[in-house]
Image (cartoon, rainbow, N blue to C red):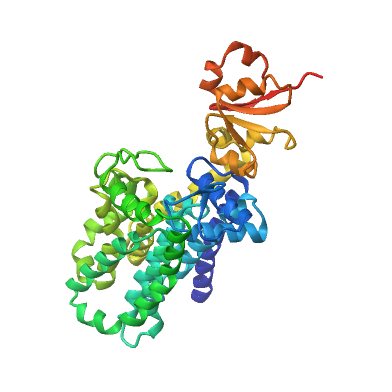
Amino acid sequence: MDKFKQQLFTHRYALSFWILVLIRSYFIAVLPLMDKTEARYGEIARLMSETGNWITPQIDYGLPFWAKPPLSTWATALSISIFGSAEVFVRLPYLIVLVGLALFIGRYSKGHVQPFYLPGIIALTIPEFYLHAGVVSTDTFLTFSITLSMFGFWEALRDQAKPYWGYLFFAGMGIGLLAKGPIVGILTLPPIFLWALINKKIQKAFFKLPWIGGILLMLALSLPWYFIAEINSPGFIDYFIVGEHFERYFNSGWKGDKYGFPKQQPLGVVWAFLILFLLPWSITFVRLLIKKGKNSIQNPWILFLLFWALWTPLFFTSSKSLIHPYVLPSCIPVALIISHYWSALKLKRIYLGFALGLPILLFTLHLSGKIKPLYAASTDKYLLEQANPEVTIFSLDQKSYSSQFYTKGKIKRIDTAYLGQLLKTNKAFYLILRNKQWEELKTPHKNQLELIDSNSKKGLYQFKAIP
């Protein structure tokens, strides 16, 4: 009977895990790509697949995108090339990566007496983690690379460790250089060094890690692309290394940003992101730090996870130019710390019930159609669905990334002067206007345009040629 109860207990956790994955799979299939960030990276990947230029990512035809290395774009473009450009396939690589990590950390269930799926369930019910398990984002592959390096280092220092763990540490670094650049070293090496210093493992790390072969592996994975990318698009290295890494970190009003927008955040806001986007588990995490503080410091494994979890927000504390996905690398160690103390955790059923209930609630609300108005204005997909694909579509002054993606790059940006010329040609076309632009439009121009569909931000208008 005890064995039967144990199996039932284990199956219940497995069922919960895969229900979470199924719900997330549903959302990546039915939700449109959202402006600005997700649709931007989706369009960059679509362009890569269409043009066959796998070296230089492009933000528009012939316009290079220097802000990020190409790993996530490669993954998305490959998926598009194989399966097509439906949203589910655009997002599929990110679901695979984070669900894979959630499964992998099951091997660290405490003494293998806890359910294998427990750490993964905690990870998948962290809002930041669950969001990125199906959002087109470079932070997903950065988190993947950091996780590989951290686990590679930890396992390599074990007695009788397999040699491949040490190489995995360096492979993670190489992958990180292709995922988001040198930031992978900044977010990985300091916590490892501090942990090794405190635990007197510096000498052991020096002898256990395959430094020569590992560094060669790291460079072999990453350096060729950087070299070829600079040859194909001169100026990339300077913009990416100096601009994206130093100017963006130290200068929140950086004027040289070619693709983004100033992110004026209060100092230390990263800690608010950590608490807010890891709810409800961030509350559990803080409570455990208070209650188990001394024990955590004395336990090498927990101390390792603590350095891993807290170093990223600590590093970004002094930066004003950041967004909430920057705390994503902290999700895995937070999940592992909570699962380690799971048996001693009070109110764990309440935390787990709330965490599991949120995705189920969102799933139910989406089926009811009640939450569509909350995101419908963040994409041009629904407006474009009302247009005849055979008729030319224009956007006044600027075009959104979602409009580029859903028209397969056919939408054209025009200014007011060109609009006046179009209205004289007697040729049918569609026009996307922001609501403010419509208000500022000249009355004669308004009289020639018919509203087809609109949301809270924009409208799709049609000019019909006179027979």
Q: Identify whether 160 is placed above or below 50.
A: below
Q: Residue 42: horizontal and vertical position, in percent?
A: 55, 49
Residue in the picture at 54% in, 62% down: 96
373 sits left or right of 318 in the view? right
323 sits left or right of 62 in the view? left
Q: Identify whether 102 is placed above or below 206.
A: above
Q: Nearer the viewer, residue 248 or 348?
A: 248
Q: Tell me which corner region of the image, top left, top right, bottom left or bottom right, holds residue 376.
A: top right
Q: Nearer the viewer, residue 14 or 28?
A: 28
Q: Residue 128: horizontal and vertical position, in percent?
A: 42, 51
372 sits left or right of 321 in the view? right
Seen as rendered, the residue at the extreme top is 443
Q: From where the camera sits, is residue 174 visible?
A: yes
Q: Tell me which corner region of the image, top left, top right, bottom left or bottom right, holds residue 236.
A: bottom left
Q: From where the camera sits, is residue 280 visible?
A: no
Q: Which quadrant, please, contains the C terminus?
A: top right
